[in-house]
Amino acid sequence: MVYQVRKLKDMHDVLYDQEWAKKQDPDLVLYEMHRETKIKNNMRYDITMIPAKMLGKEFVKTKGHSHPEEEEYRVLEGEAIFLLGPKAIRAKAGDKIIIPASCPHVTINSSKTKTLKLANWIKKDSQGDYKEFEKKQGACYYYTVDGWIKNLNYGKTKMPRW
């Protein structure tokens, strides 16, 4: 098993509330990943734990990435919002979400009190591609206490639909 954490300094490029981020400890842990908890048929099973946190005005989220292959997520605890471009999917414990190959996606913990625990299956050697999100300072929308806020670094995009 490989244990990794995503710290504020790793996420700074994709956050909405940049002023808030500048005032925080860059080593603040935002979420943790347990990679390769199982290996089966050249697939790896990962667990991600995203505590309830606010990143200034924005709800805590993953950095956002895409893969050249399909990825399967299952919500183990809590509730998630999966943002896939202009599509938003709410998922609760027990729900399974399939992310299509090459589809950029972000996972958001929209709870102020409950940890989100996710599992995913993906090819063992798969690496996430974070470049689009880093270049454009996150996904096309940010999920905040005020609802969806458009990321102005994207061209014309529709409001996320559920």
Image (cartoon, helix red, strand yellow):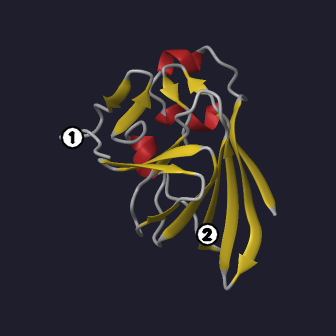
Q: Earlier in the sequence, mark 1 or mark 2?
A: 2
Answer yes or no: do the residues labelled 1 and 2 have beta carbons within 8 Å?
A: no
Taking 58 as reference, is 8 left or right? right
Compared to 120, does 44 lie above or below?
below
Residue at (21, 40) in percent of width and height: 155
Q: Is mark 2 on a helix, strand or loop?
A: strand
In this view of the protein, which residue sits in the foreground, 142 or 146?
146
Q: Residues within 10 Å of mark 2 (few under 14, many from 20)?
A: many
Question: Label 2, on which residue?
Answer: 121
Q: Mark 2: which amino acid?
A: Trp
Q: In which quarter of the image is residue 154?
A: top left
Q: Residue furthest right?
A: 1
Residue 155's tag is 1
Point out residue 80 in the picture as x, y percentages from the top left corner.
52, 45
Above or below residue 22? Residue 47 is below
The residue carrying pointer 1 sits among few (fewer than 14), some (14 to 19) or many (20 or more) residues within 10 Å by Cα, namely few
**Quadrant assignment for the N terminus:** bottom right
Q: Quick one: which residue is furthest to the left in this view?
A: 156
Q: Position of residue 38 (x, y in %)?
A: 76, 72
Tell me if I can see residue 63 in this picture.
no
Q: In this view, does 140 lie to the left or right of 90?
A: left
Instruction: Give the percent coordinates (x, y) of residue 49.
Output: 69, 46
Q: How far apart are marks 1 and 2 (CA)?
A: 32 Å
The residue sitting at the bottom extreme is 41
What is the three-letter code of the residue carrying label 1?
Answer: Gly
Mark 1 element type: loop
